């Protein structure tokens, strides 16, 4: 893969000395090579002890650990290139880990016990994942070990993520894509660098003001949804919806195509009543993307209310924002990799602080696996040697029984190592299978680099012994 990725990440980490950086790089490599294995099995005794001693340092944080990852992500992001920053919260459930101290309530209603983690995943404008650019971990309730600052509302996590990412990616025009939990006036009104915008899912039917120059007969409603519903349909767009597992009482959904009718308009969001007098309203554009007509059996109707600080002046602009919001699913794919493949909820560590650091180590690995999956889908004709190392290309060519020349060829070969059968020609292996395939690839890579002469000597000795035994039997 790209040369020395784990060493590049570790080189920028804020650690006491170079020995810890070497151990961090080796630990990242071990975790990548043994996805889903226990912490001890993946790291080995010496690395585990080294990471354990580092984790005992209370001043050491997730930001210290991932400083090199953030730096590499910024270096790999071309100057001035726009992109998406998908921000979302994941809850790690550790209710069965009785020996882990400092945990707290998780979920929106305190339905579990564990750790809260919010990440910002960078992506291109067409949704191709890149890397994590911010990670915040915290716990709730009395006795928790990583409490949210008591002087701040927990909703300020969105502002913290936006500020941190903008500091790490200066000069890149970014669109922050967030779910309905982020629908707060302070998020819309937060200062942003030039060219940066917010695109979020509407959670509340706000009081709004309309422009004074609206055409005669235009809806005079003062609530956001009523103001948009009265607007004529501007057109429709077809979106591909991925399969979705059952979650929070919602049924599982099959992969399908959805035809959405688009309405949009611009409104002024009024500040809440408890804000200081004189606070200026925020001008935003609102998009309603909704499925109409009959749906297939078991399908849930799509209805997205989206709000953007970037003013929408045409139907094409509205479609663009709708597509960008559809890429929010990418970060949920990372969460699935973390939980189902890397198995972060099985980590056996004795404190919430150490758990946060362990999750911090796993996050960029999951993002990297997802990047590889979409690199094959979006840039499959790119030479394999630009993404995989030379010995890996040789091994993949041998396993595939044909030359591996492109990224598409390589990812398919990795998928088959991970158990992917491969059906239609246009199909690609998923990120979960890719992670498993990379593990097998690494095992074969180790065998590929075993010293040739001792292996040959051992084989010759074994053959010689067999000949002698056969000779004795013949005699």
Image (tube, grey):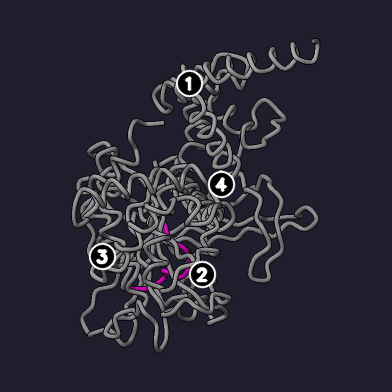
| Residue 377 visible at all | yes
Give yes or no for residue 180 being in the magenta stretch: yes
Q: State which tag comes first along the sequence, 1 or 3.
A: 3
Compared with 234, 2 (above or below) is above
**Would you name the residue on which mark 4 appears?**
235
Question: Looking at this view, is 49 or 114 the one in front?
Answer: 49
Q: State which tag comes first along the sequence, 4 or 2.
A: 2
Residue 225 circle label: 2
Give yes or no for residue 336 being in the magenta stretch: no
Q: State which tag comes first along the sequence, 2 or 3.
A: 3
Q: Secondary structure at mark 4?
A: strand
Q: Which residue shows up at 20% across the image and 48% down it?
A: 18
Q: Are marks 1 and 4 in contact (CB under 8 Å)?
A: no
**Would you name the residue on which mark 1 appears?**
454
Q: Secondary structure at mark 3?
A: loop
What are the residue bounds of the magenta stretch?
177-185
Residue 304 at x, y percent in the picture: 55, 60
Q: Which corner quadrant holds the N terminus? A: top left
**Would you name the residue on which mark 3 appears?**
60
Say left or right for 155 vs 251: left
Q: Are marks 1 and 3 in contact (CB under 8 Å)?
A: no
Q: State which tag comes first along the sequence, 3 or 4.
A: 3
């Amino acid at each position: 893969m790209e040369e020395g990725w784990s060493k590049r990440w570790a080189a920028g980490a804020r650690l006491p000395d170079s020995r810890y950086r070497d151990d961090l790089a080796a630990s990242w490599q071990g975790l990548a090579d043994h996805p889903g294995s226990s912490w001890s099995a993946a790291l080995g005794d010496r690395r585990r002890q080294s990471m354990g001693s580092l984790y005992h340092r209370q001043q050491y944080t997730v930001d210290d650990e991932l400083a090199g990852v953030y730096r590499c992500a910024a270096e790999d992001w071309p100057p001035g290139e726009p992109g998406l920053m998908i921000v979302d919260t994941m809850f790690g459930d550790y209710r069965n880990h009785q020996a882990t101290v400092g945990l707290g309530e998780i979920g929106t209603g305190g339905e579990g016990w564990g750790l809260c983690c919010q990440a910002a995943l960078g992506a291109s404008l067409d949704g191709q994942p890149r890397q994590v650019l911010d990670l915040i971990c915290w716990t709730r309730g009395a006795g928790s070990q990583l409490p949210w600052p008591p002087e701040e509302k927990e909703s300020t996590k969105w502002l913290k993520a936006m500020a941190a990412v903008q500091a790490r990616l200066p000069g890149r025009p970014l669109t922050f894509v967030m779910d309905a939990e982020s629908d707060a006036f302070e998020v819309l009104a937060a200062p942003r660098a030039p060219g940066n915008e917010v695109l979020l899912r509407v959670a509340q039917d706000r009081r709004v003001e309309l422009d004074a120059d609206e055409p005669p007969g235009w809806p005079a409603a003062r609530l956001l949804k009523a103001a948009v519903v009265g607007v004529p349909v501007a057109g429709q767009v077809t979106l591909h919806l991925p399969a979705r597992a059952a979650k929070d009482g919602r049924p599982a959904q099959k992969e399908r195509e959805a035809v959405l009718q688009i309405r949009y308009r611009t409104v002024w969001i009024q500040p809440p009543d408890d804000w200081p007098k004189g606070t200026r309203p925020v001008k935003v554009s609102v998009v309603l993307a909704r499925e109409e007509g009959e749906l297939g059996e078991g399908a849930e109707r799509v209805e997205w209310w989206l709000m953007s600080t970037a003013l929408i002046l045409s139907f094409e602009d509205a479609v663009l924002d709708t597509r960008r919001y559809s890429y929010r699913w990418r970060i949920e794919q990372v969460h699935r990799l973390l939980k189902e493949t890397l198995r972060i909820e099985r980590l056996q560590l004795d404190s919430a602080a150490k758990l946060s650091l362990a999750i911090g180590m796993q996050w960029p690995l999951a993002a990297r696996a997802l990047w590889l999956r979409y690199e094959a889908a979006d840039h499959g004709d790119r030479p394999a040697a630009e993404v995989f190392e030379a010995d890996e290309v040789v091994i993949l060519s041998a396993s595939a029984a044909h030359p591996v020349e492109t990224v598409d060829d390589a990812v398919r070969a990795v998928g088959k190592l991970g158990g992917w059968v491969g059906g239609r020609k246009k199909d690609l292996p998923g990120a979960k299978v890719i992670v498993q395939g990379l593990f097998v690839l690494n095992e074969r890579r180790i065998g590929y680099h075993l010293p040739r002469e001792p292996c040959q000597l051992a084989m010759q000795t074994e053959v010689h012994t067999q000949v002698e035994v056969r000779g004795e039997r013949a005699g």
